[in-house]
Amino acid sequence: MSLKVTLYGITRDIVGTSVIELPAPAPTTVGELLEEMRRQYPALGELRSCAVAVNHEYADNDHPLHTVDEIALIPPVAGG
């Protein structure tokens, strides 16, 4: 069992791939996922902000995660 996370923009550049899998025991909440991602990829912690979408909806840190969820790490977006 694992969590599959899709990465976009600068998060993809930092990690070096567009999809990663976190093996069991996987994080169980969005907050734990972000902590684990920042532990494995310290440069992610330098981002001003980073949103997580679960099943196409933005999710708070206490949102539970399941192996069937579609999870996306979304970096800050700048406009001009």
Image (cartoon, grey):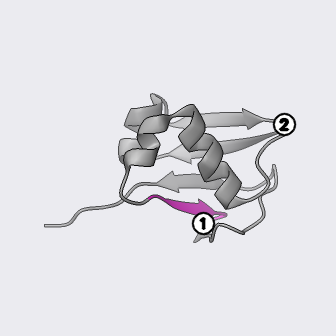
Q: Amino acid at mark 2?
A: Ala
Front residue (pair 8, 26): 26
Query: How far from the left and from the top, in percent, is residue 20?
Result: 61, 34
- Left or right placement of residue 62 versus residue 5 in this view: right
Query: How far from the left and from the top, in percent, is residue 15?
Result: 47, 32
Q: Residue at 40% of width from left, 55% of height from top?
A: 75
Q: Residues within 10 Å of mark 1 (few under 14, many from 20)?
A: few
Q: Is residue 50 above or below residue 59?
A: above
Query: How far from the left and from the top, in percent, is residue 46?
Result: 38, 46
Which quadrant is the N terminus positioned in? top right
Q: Amino acid at mark 1?
A: His
Residue under pointer 2: 24
Q: CA distance from mark 1 to mark 2?
A: 23 Å
Q: Residue at 79% of width from left, 42% of height from top?
A: 26
**Quarter of image, res 48:** bottom left
Which stretch is magenta?
50-55
Q: Residues within 10 Å of mark 2 (few under 14, many from 20)?
A: few
Looking at the rendered structure, the number of numbered marks drawn on it comes to 2
Q: Residue at 58% of width from left, 63% of height from top?
A: 53
Residue under pointer 1: 56
Q: Is residue 55 above or below residue 21?
A: below
